[in-house]
Image: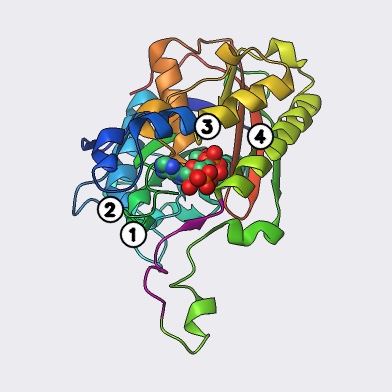
């Protein structure tokens, strides 16, 4: 019988430094009104000097372990776009700092869809008997790849981390990952890209151009594709799970833009109130966005044990996905 991955704990953390829209408008040609009305974002948290992704990931992981009442797990999967170093992966450092010794640990790179790809990887590690319990962490010091003078990206992104504990269990338990749908389209690789620092640039015979360490985004292309792909993957995963869309209690979409979340809810035929929103406070935290949203939703009572939850994301690659689970009785930490 297939061993199913069951969500057994959740935790999150955010940097303390709050950067408001007004603060951004002092540096770049933008306004609080423009950012609020075009994105829904009011403020975001950015790391202090000296804080790297692993620092956030360790804290979120510690809190998820506490929520699951565990002090050990058998593996760590870290979804991030901003590893501490290009090489090696950051997950082994996180595992060591959590006191987990020599457990399996690796990074997953799928930008804003990274947490969903991480869940799939974690479910696979459980299915093949590599792990009885594990951490899936989404953590980003995303501001480290953002040009603070680029008004197309600086207002959008923020930093933070969220983590869940998965344990081996049965498909009919609350918290079991019921369905998953993942996809990608490399034709859209340029829509969200850091041009410098990889083998493409290093074998070009040219040093990186100024600013090529920063992410470039084609905002409108991303916007259009995000709505289409998130909606399609939600339909596909609902079909696979056998859930009529109206039975979904909470849609937890990747927190990129409130207009994207509203459009996906509308295209699915869900009332806007069923789409969870916390991007007003944190902006787009890429791979951290879904676990941060789940932790907030659980803490605020927006999701309760027994509710049907639909997760969906779209991000660089392009990559996207959706997943279903019935919310378990867990207290976020
Ligand atoms: N402040 C003020 N004006 C701005 C601005 C800013 N920060 N950014 C762009 N503008 C201006 C543009 O110059 C343009 O002016 P013009 O009409 O005079 O030429 C106008 O606003 C519209 O620009 P546009 O790029 O079409 O804005 P938009 O409505 O597409 O919103 C995004 C831009 C980035 C908010 C939007 O495209 C978006 O959210 N995309 C998805 C981003 C995302 O989710 N990325 C991560 C996905 S994983």
Residue labelled 2 has its Cβ within 8 Å of some atom of ligand 1 = no
- Using the rendered view, name the quadrant where residue 138 is placed: top left
- Look at the numbered disc 4 and give the secondary structure of its residue: strand
- Examine the image and state in which quarter residue 200 appears: bottom right
Given contact means CB atoms under 8 Å apart, are the residues at marks 1 and 2 in contact? yes
Residue at which label 3 appears: 167
From the image, tell me which residue sits under label 2: 52
Sequence-earlier tag: 4 or 2: 2
Q: Is residue 147 left or right of residue 106?
A: left
Closer to the N terminus: mark 1 or mark 3? Answer: 1
Q: Main secondary structure of the magenta part?
A: loop
- Confirm or deny contact between disc 3 and disc 4 (CB under 8 A): no
User: Which stretch is magenta?
Assistant: 208-218
Horizontal and vertical percent position of residue 204: 52, 85
Mark closer to the chain start, 3 or 4? 3
Q: 330 left or right of 121?
A: left
Q: Is residue 112 visible?
A: no
Q: Residue 209 in magenta?
A: yes
Numbered-mark total = 4
Residue 2 location (% of width, % of height): 71, 35
Q: Is the residue marked by circle 2 packed among few (<14), some (14-19), or many (20+) residues within 10 Å?
A: some
Q: Residue at x 76, y 28 (%)?
A: 235
Labels 3, 2: front one: 2
- Between the residue at mark 1 and the residue at mark 2, the CA separation in whole angstroms equals 6 Å
Name the disc covering residue 322, or none.
4
Report the quarter where the C terminus lies.
Answer: top left
Image depth: mark 3 or mark 4 in front: 4
Sooner in the amino-acid sequence: mark 4 or mark 1: 1
Residue plotted at (39% across, 44% down): 139
Label whose residue precedes the other's in the sequence (1 or 2):
2
Residue holding disc 1? 84
């Amino acid at each position: 019988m297939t061993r199913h991955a069951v969500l057994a704990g959740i935790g999150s953390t955010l940097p303390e430094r709050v950067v408001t829209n007004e603060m951004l408008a002092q540096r770049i040609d933008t306004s609080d009104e423009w950012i609020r009305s075009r994105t829904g974002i009011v403020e975001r948290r950015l790391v202090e000097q000296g804080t790297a992704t692993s620092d956030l990931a360790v804290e979120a992981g510690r809190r998820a372990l506490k929520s699951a009442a565990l002090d050990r797990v058998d593996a760590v999967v870290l979804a991030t776009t901003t590893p501490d170093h290009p090489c090696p992966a950051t997950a082994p450092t996180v595992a060591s700092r959590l006191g987990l010794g020599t457990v399996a640990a690796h990074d997953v790179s799928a930008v804003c869809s990274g947490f969903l790809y991480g869940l799939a990887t974690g479910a696979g590690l459980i299915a093949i008997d590599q792990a009885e319990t594990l951490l899936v962490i989404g953590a980003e010091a995303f501001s480290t790849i953002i040009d603070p003078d680029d008004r197309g990206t600086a207002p959008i992104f923020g930093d933070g981390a969220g983590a869940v504990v998965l344990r081996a269990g049965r498909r009919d338990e609350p918290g079991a990952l019921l369905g998953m749908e993942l996809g990608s389209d490399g034709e859209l690789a340029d829509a969200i890209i850091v041009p410098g620092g990889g083998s493409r640039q290093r074998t070009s015979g040219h040093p990186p151009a100024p600013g090529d360490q920063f992410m470039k985004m084609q905002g409108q292309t991303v916007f259009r594709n995000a709505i289409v792909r998130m909606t399609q993957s939600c339909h596909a995963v609902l079909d696979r799970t056998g859930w009529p869309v109206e039975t979904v209690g909470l849609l937890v979409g990747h927190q990129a833009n409130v207009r994207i979340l509203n459009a996906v809810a509308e295209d699915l035929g869900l009332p806007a109130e069923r789409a969870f929103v916390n991007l007003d406070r944190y902006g787009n935290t890429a791979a951290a966005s879904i676990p941060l949203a789940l932790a907030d939703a659980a803490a605020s009572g927006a999701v309760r044990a027994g509710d049907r939850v639909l997760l969906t994301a779209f991000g660089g690659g392009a990559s996207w996905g959706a997943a279903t689970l019935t919310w378990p009785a867990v207290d976020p930490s």
